Amino acid sequence: MAGRVLVAIESKPVIAALRRDLEQAGFAVDVAPLAAAAGKVDPALHEVALVRAVDGAELVVASLRRADPQLAVVAIFFDEEEAAGYPGALGADGLLIGPLTAPQVASTCSLAARLTLARRQLAEQTRIAAPRAVSGAHDLAFLKRLLFVEVKRSRRYGYPLSLALVSVDRWDELSEQLGPRARTTLLGELTGVVATVVRDIDVSVPFSDDRLVVLMPHTATGGGLQVARRICARVRERSSAIPLTVSAGLASHDGHGTVSFGKLVKRAGEALTRAREAGGDRAVSAEPPKRRDRISIG
């Protein structure tokens, strides 16, 4: 079984079509009226919620987030014209635009289910204050796919996105003074601090031993820089026996042209280097790209 989807739609024909496509893809399906959707969410069962874009649907999405902050929500639009009337996509994590096809529905829900899983894993590792032992391959592959989808959305609707690399200052020196358990606990604290700063539509995953990458949809350079600076301040001001500061490098995409995961990370890494060279404990934004890059997920 691929997972369980909560469908919050009033139209019986649409429900029937979605149920058919989702069940063929291995998903189980539950149906709820829009107004009652939040009360039907079960974090132990549901991995995705589908919400029909109608008046008041933003409130439904918000109530779903309150009921289960980790649940990925996908908004459904019947056509491009309707979607253009909701530039913020209801605040959802993803969107489906008609005419819907079975592969489109299945792939979008599969990606959304992975987002829910990643958020729940992050919440759990924050709870136990310990990052996963293996952080890179699975999370970065997921983030590349998510970024590819977000770039396509940002180009279509002209909204920006930002990516930040957050790294512990003087990590090599600090790690030599700590044992393995203390290092694990410290990095777990860092993960938890970042989770308290970013929004529920943002995604943060471990990037390497001392780094996290934060993807911020619907966020221009100015907003992304504010988030990165708050992360630096929150880490600096946290109560802990071990003093710690971080630096952050930010790269942004303005919603026009194309970009790749690799190019964004490269630009964020260059900005991170400049932040460290300036003494650390600060966030620095990358210079805007001089030319448009081709879409890539590599």
Image (cartoon, rainbow, N blue to C red):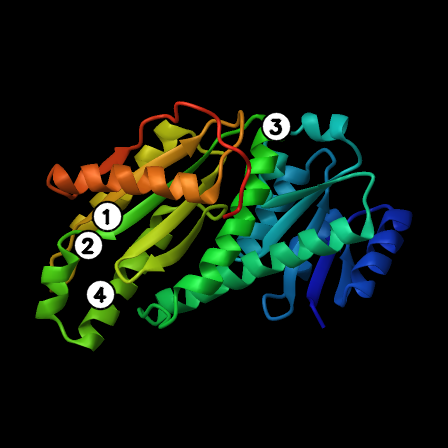
Q: Which residue is mark 3?
A: 157
Can you identify the residue that label 1 sits on?
234
The residue type indicated by label 3 comes to: Tyr
Q: Which residue is mark 4?
A: 186
- Front: mark 4 or 3: 3
Tell me, yes or no, if residue 33 can be seen here. Answer: no
Earlier residue among tags 4 and 2: 4
Q: In front here: 124 or 40? A: 124
The quarter holding residue 129 reads bottom left
Q: Are marks 2 and 1 in contact (CB under 8 Å)?
A: yes
Residue 172 position within the rendered picture, expressed as x and y whole percent measured from the top left: 14, 61
Q: Quadrant of the N terminus?
A: bottom right
Image coordinates for residue 11, horizontal then vertical, percent: 86, 46
Q: Check disc 2 and report its element: helix, strand or loop.
A: loop
Q: Is residue 32 visible?
A: yes
For residue 279, side relative to residue 155 (left or right)? left
Q: Secondary structure at mark 4?
A: helix
* Left or right, residue 138 beside residue 105: left
Q: CA distance from mark 4 to mark 3?
A: 40 Å
Amino acid type at image mark 2? Arg
Residue 251 picture quarter: top left
Q: Name above or below for residue 16 compared with residue 80.
A: below
Labelled pair 4, 2 in contact (Cβ < 8 Å): no
Q: Earlier in the sequence, mark 4 or mark 3?
A: 3
In the image, what residue type sits under mark 4?
Leu
**Mark 1 vs 3, N-terminal side:** 3
* Front position among marks 4 and 1: 4
Can you identify the residue that label 2 sits on? Answer: 238
Q: Is 246 on the left-hand or right-hand side of 14?
A: left
Point 53% across, 46% down: residue: 297
Residue 69 coordinates in the image, percent (x, y): 51, 55
Of badges 1 and 3, nearer the viewer stands 3
